[in-house]
Amino acid sequence: MSNDSNPFAPAGGGYSANVSFGGAPAAAAPAAPAAPAAPAASGAPAASGDLIRDTTTQAFTADVIQESRNQVVLVDFWAPWCGPCKQLTPIIEKAVRAAGGRVKLVKMNIDDHPQVAGQLGIQSIPAVIAFKNGQPVDGFMGAQPESKVAEFIERVAGPGDEQAAIRQALDEAQALLAQGDAETALAIFSEIIAVAPDNLAALGGAAGILADRGELDAARELLDAAPADKASDAAIVSARARLTLADQVSGLGNPAELASRLEADPKDHQARFDLAMIDNARGDRTAAADRLLAIMKADRSWNDDGARRQLLQFFEAWGMADEATLSARRKLSALLFS
């Protein structure tokens, strides 16, 4: 996190080189009376275990600065009267335990120990700062949802072994898909779902392959397993679009007959449209897009601008970064604005 975006950086930029933790106070901050370690105040769960503990001004150097040279240490600055602090406490403690030892949590009651918070320029609580190799590297202020706290921990500590393995497997599956090996990609997505049933990228990837193969019920079952509040995720949206396309293709008829109709009457836009749908089902995205663009060029108003609307649905199913999408978008732009 840069100083410009760092909410914990003092005025003037950067962290003060004069700040000392647990030793002589910084010149800019008055010395606070030494205070013994105190139990957690009422309203804040007591810290326990090696991963979570309370600290004091005197113990800050050992608990945070020195310990952060071994692993990332999160410091939670809180106070007993702070409502958002009480909201954050169970969330961050749960996230730290779930991280499996990649981070530790040190809690500091700023009512009892105001000096360190003052030296770091903290003016609002709860405030959480991540220390690594003896230095503050990132942080956030205010109560955050569990998902955001987990993202923060992953950002400062890196993914866990299982998460890293899942990411590597997803990358491998996507690469295989790009090479046309959908069968192996599906097998990898299925393995990921077995250990992480709510992984949206794996659910969407597997459902999309099943939809392309015509296994529509199996694709729907996978998509129905995705959390309802994640329906807008790109992988889920793409898979549902591919499922919709597969439903549409199932009743289109014989492509040879459609081709004969089009050869006999080049203005048979319905035949050209149906062939575009079949091209897409066969994986020939460029041909599918070109057929729809040809309809638009000949008769933009056909079927209430149906060719353009279908092309946009293709883009959604293929993904915005797909090469076929990018190429067809350029052609569409030239057609619309030339």
Image (cartoon, grey):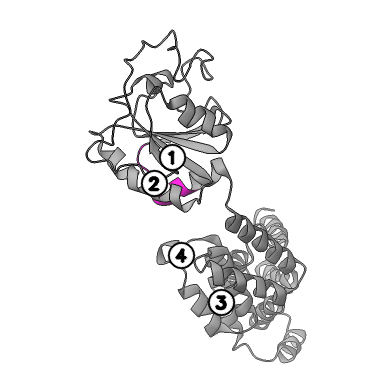
Q: Badge 2, how many Cα within 10 Å: few under 14, some, many 20+? A: some
On screen, residue 122 above or below 196: above
What kind of element bears circle 2?
Answer: helix
Q: Earlier in the sequence, mark 1 or mark 3?
A: 1
Q: Residues within 10 Å of mark 4 (few under 14, many from 20)?
A: some
* Region rendered in magenta: 142-150
Amino acid type shown at disc 4: Ala
Which of pointers 2 and 4 indicates the residue nearer the eye? Answer: 2
Residue type at the position of mark 3: Leu
Residue linked to disc 1: 105
Q: Nearer the viewer, residue 263 or 41?
A: 41
Instruction: Answer whether residue 309 is visible to the viewer in this image.
Output: no
Marks 1/3: CA distance? Answer: 45 Å
Q: Position of residue 318 (x, y in %)?
A: 64, 66
Magenta run includes residue 144: yes
Mark 1 or 4 closer to N-term? 1
Verify CB contact (< 8 Å) between mark 2 and mark 1: yes
Q: Residue at x 71, y 74 (%)?
A: 184
Residue located 39% across and 38% down the image: 53
Q: Which residue is mark 2?
A: 93
* Mark number, residue 231: 4
Q: Amino acid at mark 1?
A: Leu
Please state which of residues 338 and 324 is positioned toward the viewer in this rendering.
324
In the displayed structure image, the side of residue 279 where residue 114 appears, left or right: left
Secondary element type, mark 1: strand
Q: Which residue is mark 3?
A: 243
Quadrant of the rendered image containing residue 107:
top left
Q: Earlier in the sequence, mark 3 or mark 2?
A: 2
From the viewer's side, name the closer residue of 212 and 90: 90
Between marks 4 and 3 in the image, the one whose residue lies nearer the viewer = 4
Distance of mark 2 from mark 4, alpha carbons?
Answer: 29 Å
The residues bearing labels 1 and 4 have C-alpha atoms spaced at a distance of: 34 Å
